[in-house]
Amino acid sequence: MSDHLWGYQPTSGHTAGADLTGYTVEATDGSIGKVDKHSDDVGSAYLVVDTGVWIFGKEVLLPAGTVKGIDTEHRTIFVDLTKEQIKDSPEFDKHKHTGDPAYHAQVESYYVGHRLR
């Protein structure tokens, strides 16, 4: 499963190159925020979500493999995680999220253990 965590699921409806900035992100039990930044890089695709006041302005890093669907008409992304799972995720590090293999391994380890089946 971890091999595909950093890439969009084929059933997600994601089109490479699509701008997801500003899309609302919905967990299985409600909204968690909006996409602040994203990447389509092969083997390292992700979303950075600004959670706003929900968890005091925290940003979270969601590997693209957690995306289960994208509604382009309503600009909404659905992830297969609960709000609590996202809230408890590793702290987002804006300096390490793009090139630190140890940080990616930490994030990957957390999400592999918490994804819904």
Image (spheres, rainbow, N blue to C red):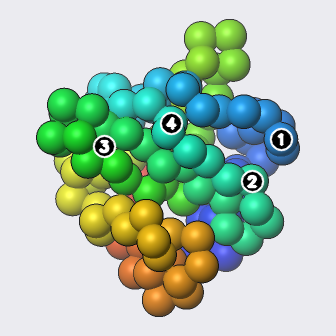
Q: Amino acid at mark 3?
A: Thr
The reply to whether discs 2 and 1 touch (Cβ–Cβ < 8 Å) is yes
Q: Residues within 10 Å of mark 2 (few under 14, many from 20)?
A: some
* Residue to which mark 1 is pinned: 17
Q: Amino acid at mark 2?
A: Asp
- Where does residue 9 sit, x and y in percent of width and height? 70, 50
Asked if one can make out residue 69 in the rendered structure from this viewpoint, the answer is yes
What whole-number distance in Å separates the C-alpha atoms at marks 4 and 3?
A: 17 Å
Q: Amino acid at mark 1?
A: Gly
Give the secondary structure at mark 3. Answer: loop
Q: Amino acid at mark 4?
A: Val
Q: Residues within 10 Å of mark 1 (few under 14, many from 20)?
A: few
Q: Earlier in the sequence, mark 4 or mark 3?
A: 4
Q: Earlier in the sequence, mark 1 or mark 4?
A: 1
Q: Residues within 10 Å of mark 3 (few under 14, many from 20)?
A: some
Give me the residue at 44% from left, 31% from top.
Answer: 34
90 and 109: which one is in front? Answer: 90
Q: Residues within 10 Å of mark 4 (few under 14, many from 20)?
A: many
What whole-number distance in Å separates the C-alpha atoms at marks 1 and 4?
A: 15 Å
Disc 1 or disc 3, which is closer to the eye? 1
Residue 31 placement: quadrant: top left
Give me the residue at 36% from left, 31% from top.
Answer: 33
Give the secondary structure at mark 4. Answer: strand
What whole-number distance in Å separates the C-alpha atoms at marks 2 and 1?
A: 7 Å
In this view, the residue farthest toward the right is 16
Disc 4 or disc 3, which is closer to the eye? 4
Give me the residue at 48% from left, 54% from top.
Answer: 62
Q: Is residue 114 above or below residue 50?
A: below
- Where does residue 75 sit, x and y in percent of width and height? 60, 18
Residue 25 placement: quadrant: top left
* Residue to which mark 2 is pinned: 40
Q: Earlier in the sequence, mark 2 or mark 1?
A: 1
